[in-house]
């Protein structure tokens, strides 16, 4: 800071140069298969069941229509979860013309169509 400001004294360093550290950093995360997952067509739905999990995909609309985990319902029976690949732009996005550059993500969200859920069922 060239001059003192509230909460920051004169000479305070606000930012410094960013340095590339290089190298390869691998997360220490393991994905372990545990438990059985069952999927079947039932009552016009693709029903996926596992321990404490029940998910239903409506085979007509192809959307996720029901989601229950550990006894907690996560959607209304009348609602469908739909994939959404778009987010509302912020000020920085407008400065970089991002809404125009990435408008295809909004368009695909509005017109997405699932062609197939399972090939081997």
Image (tube, helix red, strand yellow):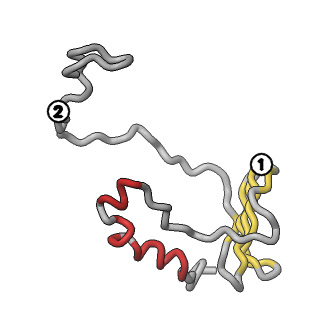
Disc 2 crowd, CA 10 A, few/some/many (<14, 14-19, 20+): few
Disc 1 crowd, CA 10 A, few/some/many (<14, 14-19, 20+): few
Using residue 38 as the reference point, say whether residue 103 is left or right of it. Answer: left
Query: Which quadrant of the figure has residue 17?
Result: top left
Question: Which labelled disc corresponds to residue 31?
Answer: none
Q: Nearer the viewer, residue 21 or 40?
A: 21
Look at the image and tell me in which quarter the N terminus lies.
Answer: top left
In contact (CB < 8 Å): disc 2 and disc 1: no
Query: Which quadrant of the figure has residue 67?
Result: bottom right
Look at the image and tell me in which quarter the C terminus lies.
Answer: bottom right
Measure the alpha-carbon separation of dots 2 and 1.
Answer: 47 Å
**Residue named by callout 2:** 17
Residue sitting at x 29%, y 14%: 9
- Locate residue 21, reporting x and y percent: 19, 35
Q: Is residue 5 above or below residue 91?
A: above
Q: Is residue 120 above or below residue 85?
A: below
- Locate residue 85, reporting x and y percent: 49, 67
Q: Secondary structure at mark 1?
A: loop
Q: Nearer the viewer, residue 86 or 69?
A: 86
Residue sitting at x 17%, y 35%: 19
**Residue named by callout 1:** 70
Residue sitting at x 67%, y 61%: 37
Q: Nearer the viewer, residue 91 or 45?
A: 91
Disc number lying in front (2 or 1): 2
- Locate residue 73, reporting x and y percent: 79, 56
Which label's residue is closer to the chain start, 2 or 1? 2
Residue sitting at x 71%, y 66%: 48
Q: Is residue 47 above or below residue 94?
A: below
Q: Secondary structure at mark 2?
A: loop
- Locate residue 102, reporting x and y percent: 37, 70
Using residue 93 as the reference point, say whether residue 121 is left or right of it. Answer: right
């Amino acid at each position: 800071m060239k001059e003192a400001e509230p909460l920051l004294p004169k000479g305070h360093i606000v930012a410094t140069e960013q340095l590339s550290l290089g190298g390869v950093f691998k997360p220490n995360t393991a994905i372990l298969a545990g438990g059985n997952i069952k999927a079947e067509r039932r009552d016009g739905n693709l029903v996926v069941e596992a321990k404490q999990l029940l998910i239903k995909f409506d085979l007509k609309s192809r959307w996720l229509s029901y989601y229950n985990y550990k006894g907690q319902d996560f959607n209304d029976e009348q609602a469908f979860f739909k994939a959404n690949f778009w987010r509302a732009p912020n000020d920085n996005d407008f400065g970089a013309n991002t809404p125009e550059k990435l408008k295809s993500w909004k368009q695909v969200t509005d017109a997405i169509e699932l062609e197939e859920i399972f090939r081997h069922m």
